[in-house]
Amino acid sequence: MVVPVSTTLTPVRVPSPARQAPRRRTRVLALPEARWALASTVAFLVALALDLGGLPWWAYGPLYAVAYVTGGWEPALEGLRALRGRTLDVDLLMIVAALGAAAIGQVRDGALLIVIFATSGALEALATARTADSVRGLLDLAPSMATRVTEHGEEPVPTSELAVGDVLLIRPGERIGADGRVLDGASEADQATITGEPLPVTKGPGDEVFAGTLNGTGVLRVRVERDPADSVIARIVTLVEEASRTKAPTQLFIEKVEQRYALGMVTATLAVFGVPLIFGAGLTDALLRAMTFMIVASPCAVVLATMPPLLSAIANAGRHGVLVKSAVAMERLGEVDAVALDKTGTLTEGTPEVSAVRPLPGSGLTPDALLALAAAAEHPSEHPLGRAVVRAARERGLRIADARDFAAVPGRGVTAVVGGRVTGVGRAGDPVTGSVDLGPDADATGVPGTEDGDTVVLVTGDGVPLGTLALTDRLRPHAPATTAALTALTGTAPVLLTGDNARAAARVAEATGLVDVRADLLPEGKVDAVRQLQDAGRKVLFVGDGVNDAPALAAAHSGLAMGRAGSDLALETADAVVVRDELTTVPSVVRLSRAARRLVVQNLVIAGTFITGLVLWDLLGHLPLPLGVAGHEGSTVLVGLNGLRLLRESAWRSGQVPVQGTRG
């Protein structure tokens, strides 16, 4: 039975391949945690200014109270709920410590503690919301409606109702509604969101297509081969969610430590208060000793011992174009001992450029004349290869002649009349360029041919072959230096993981000194490779940029996304983003993270020494409250200043990658 297909199509404007689905993004102040943290911070800062300005208590005291209430009511409520479930967390402990500080006159210290924890809670809520936004937004890549072809014609249907075996009509510029296989038609599909390939891929009968990818200028009939719930794009969402859940054991470990510390401190405080009473001490003296103990044993110094180095490293990295999303992310970057790299958009720039111009013997053309002729024919084209040819001609200062009667054949190439002759640019052996054998390296079925990883097109004049152009995805200038620096940092060369073809991957690997190369990978293949490394005991840093890289970014111990052309999902999933796409910053930020982790250890030793000394003094002797507060605050200032050392420019320069002599 022949299924009818309409041949009368309304002209459709083809959107730019870079166009993405509308972005869903939670606004910061839409989160109640952020609003309460902001209110607490503002109240504290105003109160602090009035306090230091010498105003009477009634002028700033109520503002300190506002800071306590707005910043502390939510963690206090959660802590009480946890207490009802027979668990005790550090959040509740901090609220008690803050109230204890206020009870003995240290209202300012208690308010600062409240502000720190309220802000931390708001940042955690924001990170959770943004990750959820990006995962939900990914589903917008797949269209909500598709055109199904039946015995009775065409009908629009929701993509969620499609079934295996349905036949879809994909018009020019439409997103493909389901994973399937082409029955007939010729076109190109921009499937960078799935495979990471930088150029549109030719699609013809028998070729596989993916939901959410963008059809080019041709018309395709596609048979659905996967249920929409099992499409590649849907599996990416599932993989991101599953990989995010694998980090839960670390969080459980932290909660256990918090629980033990909280129980130990509460028990010790009660003992410090109760034991002296048993032996006849006065109530006031016992209460003062217990409150002093709570102040000096407070983990504020420990919190500040950890945060200033990491936050300073985050600020320093930000000045140099690397956005690290949290202190936890910065710390994890310094733990990595293996690196996996995406190719397209990471080691390469993700855009094609002309790498060779080869006139054929007897054509009578110089390389510049051949390039100028091809550029004239391609000038009206919107195809990435055509734009690359025109750009190369302009960079050489060549004159691009006027062309007329331009025509583009989807999946084949272009023709135009240039200088009185019909000029074709496309693959060999098709109606555009004619039947020509380019040799064993040419691709006889795809468009265009490939040679040593380059894309090769044929230029003809009136059907006569004139020469070939080779185009390549340009390697980032400092990619070899970066891979060498990462090898030195981790002790092993990075692994190259790409959805592109093996020849293109091999060419990039040779240029960057990489040995372990895995090509033709779908998103789950990259995840499997990352998990294999981690199962072998390695802590993997994955560097990528596309939607197809998001699952691997989430599965890795640490994920870093290239930001300039990176997809929303990759940017939200990654722990850090290279905003300016400067590849050399990757090893630099890893070194900076390692320096921050060393300072964290130093600060913990300093803080632990002060806390232990002050606690023993309070328990074994008589520690005056002012001296206890001075010792506690002094240790806090000391570790804070030590952590701020990473704000210096020299901290970043010490980790910079030398770029002299790198290959382009």
Image (tube, rainbow, N blue to C red):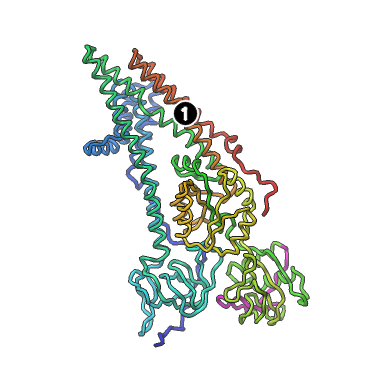
Which residue is at 32% across, 26% downward?
61
Q: Is residue 501 left or right of residue 575?
A: right
In the figure, is residue 287 to the left or right of 649?
A: left
Q: Between residues 298 and 517, which one lies in front from this camera angle?
A: 517
Magenta stretch holds residue 397: yes
Q: The residue tagged with tag 1: helix, strand or loop?
A: helix
Q: Quadrant of the C terminus?
A: bottom right
Q: Nearer the viewer, residue 387 or 272?
A: 272
Q: Is residue 601 left or right of residue 262?
A: right
| Residue at the image point whose x is 60% and y is 63% from the top | 504
- Over which residues does the magenta segment extend? 396-418
Q: Residue flagged by tag 1: what amino acid is it?
A: Asn
Residue 473 shown left or right of residue 328 in the figure: right
- Among the 4 quarters of the image, the one containing residue 440: bottom right
Residue ID at (36%, 78%): 155
Residue 293 screen position, x and y as percent? 32, 21
